[in-house]
């Protein structure tokens, strides 16, 4: 019998998405609740979750067991952020100021803002600077309960800089408790040295992808007006699939330009954003196994229409939530704030929001059965919330008051905060 190496005892409750794999429709809001509860952990894995007496009897602590007092508190799975751009240099604070004063998109670009300003700063920086930036950003995310995160490239847009980003992401991940899934976003936008999207995609496939595929786990493309249309996105995604990468897509952020039909046809993992998705698109997505990743902090930041979350849930789509953490359109690393926005603006219940940034977000990253639930055999990624009710995580705006964060069975923090 495995020895209990960490015991969280006498909790008000242990709360987790129910079932296995991605949740959709009515199942999205189904939770497994143990109240009261204790959680036994052995090494990196969860041994048991249940009533305190049962857990203690069946899994007695070993001589060196670490004990965490859970009285008056609840535990939840570590949060999974499945869409971030946390690898970048520089900032766009001046752009934010101009936007708050009513500057148009064209005026921002004329003032040197927009994605290409981040591309310039990232190209100029060293790999060491990128490693430090990603490590810092992962630390911010961990403070807010994220224990697993995707991090994209996409601010290099040439061979050397994209590879520098991917290598920096991997190096930063080795120095952070947060598990990181690197994504190659070579097709983020068209850099100024190329005359057309098609020409740039040919360059990516020929000159960047073979090496980038050595470092990335997935590939992403921005299918939108002014970036890449469906033919270029198809060419890029099909080439990335040949290298064994999981496929993702930014789509329907500002306009519907065929992202959902292409995603369904290719059977890719997710379409992210969907602020411009109409009812027909939502129904098409719901009939597929493509996950709809919703990014309400970005919609708030840019004052965009909100994605059709309730339609997607009603029609049975797989939905996930993520921060879209980036310097220009969603400078937010907090999944609890995203959960609050999902409840107050998208019409999701707290239970649906929890599943969307744990179990379903894990599914997007290909981590079913590993993270996103409090269940025997899963990685012991656990948040001890300093509240009597798990719903405080979304209910308390910015309510990530954790007395402990546990990653792969290791106690990372304790007390009232860091």
Image (cartoon, rainbow, N blue to C red):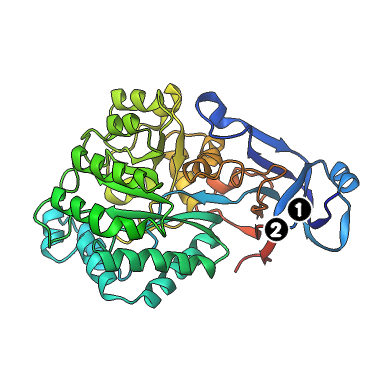
Label 2 element class:
loop
Say above or below: 115 vs 257.
below
Q: Nearer the viewer, residue 267 or 16?
A: 267
Q: Position of residue 292 (x, y in %)?
A: 40, 36
Image side of residue 341 versus residue 223, left or right:
right
Which quarter shows the C terminus? Answer: bottom right
Residue name at image x 34 percent, y 27 percent: 282
The disc placed on residue 136 is none
Say above or below: 168 vs 318.
below
**Hey, which residue is sitting farthest right in the picture?**
57
Residue name at image x 19 percent, y 38 percent: 231
Badge 2 crowding class, 10 Å Cα cut-off, few under 14, some 14 to 19, many 20 or more, is many
Q: Nearer the viewer, residue 58 or 69?
A: 58
Image side of residue 93 versus residue 150, left or right:
left
Residue name at image x 46 percent, y 65 percent: 170
Q: Determine the image quadrant of residue 237.
A: top left
Q: CA distance from mark 1 to mark 2?
A: 6 Å
User: In the rendered structure, are the residues bearing label 1 and label 2 in contact, judged by CB atoms less than 8 Å apart?
Assistant: yes
Residue name at image x 41 percent, y 39 percent: 269
Which residue is disc 2 drawn over? 409
Residue 199 visible in rendering? yes
Q: Nearer the viewer, residue 359 or 95?
A: 359
Q: Position of residue 134 (x, y in %)?
A: 43, 67
Q: Position of residue 344 (x, y in %)?
A: 44, 39
Which residue is disc 1 drawn over? 41
Q: Determine the image quadrant of residue 137.
A: bottom left
Label 1 element class:
strand
Q: Earlier in the sequence, mark 1 or mark 2?
A: 1
């Amino acid at each position: 019998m495995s020895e209990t190496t960490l015991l969280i005892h006498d909790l008000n409750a242990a709360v987790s998405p129910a079932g296995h794999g991605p949740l959709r429709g009515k199942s999205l809001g189904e939770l497994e609740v143990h109240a009261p509860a204790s959680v036994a952990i052995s090494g990196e894995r969860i041994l048991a979750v249940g009533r305190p007496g049962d857990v203690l009897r069946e899994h007695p602590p070993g001589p060196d067991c670490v004990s965490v007092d859970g009285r008056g508190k609840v535990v939840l799975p570590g949060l999974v952020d499945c869409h971030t751009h946390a690898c970048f240099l520089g900032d766009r604070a001046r752009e934010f100021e101009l936007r708050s004063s009513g500057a148009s998109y064209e005026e921002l670009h004329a003032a040197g803002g927009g994605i290409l300003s981040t591309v310039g700063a990232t190209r100029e920086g060293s790999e060491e600077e990128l490693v430090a930036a990603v490590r810092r950003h992962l630390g911010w995310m961990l403070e807010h309960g994220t224990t697993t995160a995707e991090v994209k490239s996409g601010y290099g847009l040439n061979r050397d800089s994209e590879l520098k980003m991917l290598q920096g992401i991997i190096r930063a991940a080795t120095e952070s408790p947060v598990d990181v899934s690197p994504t190659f976003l070579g097709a983020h936008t068209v850099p100024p040295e190329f005359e057309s999207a098609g020409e740039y995609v040919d360059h990516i496939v020929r000159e960047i992808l073979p090496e980038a595929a050595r470092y990335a786990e997935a590939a992403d493309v921005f299918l939108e007006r002014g970036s890449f249309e469906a033919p270029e996105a198809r060419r890029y995604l099909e080439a990335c699939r040949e290298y064994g990468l999981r496929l993702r897509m930014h789509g329907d952020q500002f306009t519907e330009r065929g992202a959902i039909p292409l995603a369904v046809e290719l059977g890719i993992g997710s379409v992210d954003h969907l602020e411009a998705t109409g009812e027909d698109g939502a129904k098409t997505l719901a009939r597929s196994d493509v996950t709809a990743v919703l990014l309400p902090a970005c919609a708030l930041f840019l004052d965009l229409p909100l994605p059709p979350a309730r339609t997607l849930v009603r029609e049975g789509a797989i939905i996930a939530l993520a921060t879209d953490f980036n310097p220009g359109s969603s400078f937010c690393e907090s999944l609890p704030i995203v959960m609050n926005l999902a409840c107050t603006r998208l019409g999701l219940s707290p239970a649906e929001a929890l599943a969307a940034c744990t179990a379903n977000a894990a599914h997007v990253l290909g981590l079913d059965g590993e993270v996103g639930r409090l269940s025997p055999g899963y990685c012991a990624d656990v948040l001890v919330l300093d509240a009597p009710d798990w719903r405080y995580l979304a209910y308390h705006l910015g309510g990530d008051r954790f007395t402990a964060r546990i990653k792969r069975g290791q106690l990372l923090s304790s007390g009232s905060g860091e």
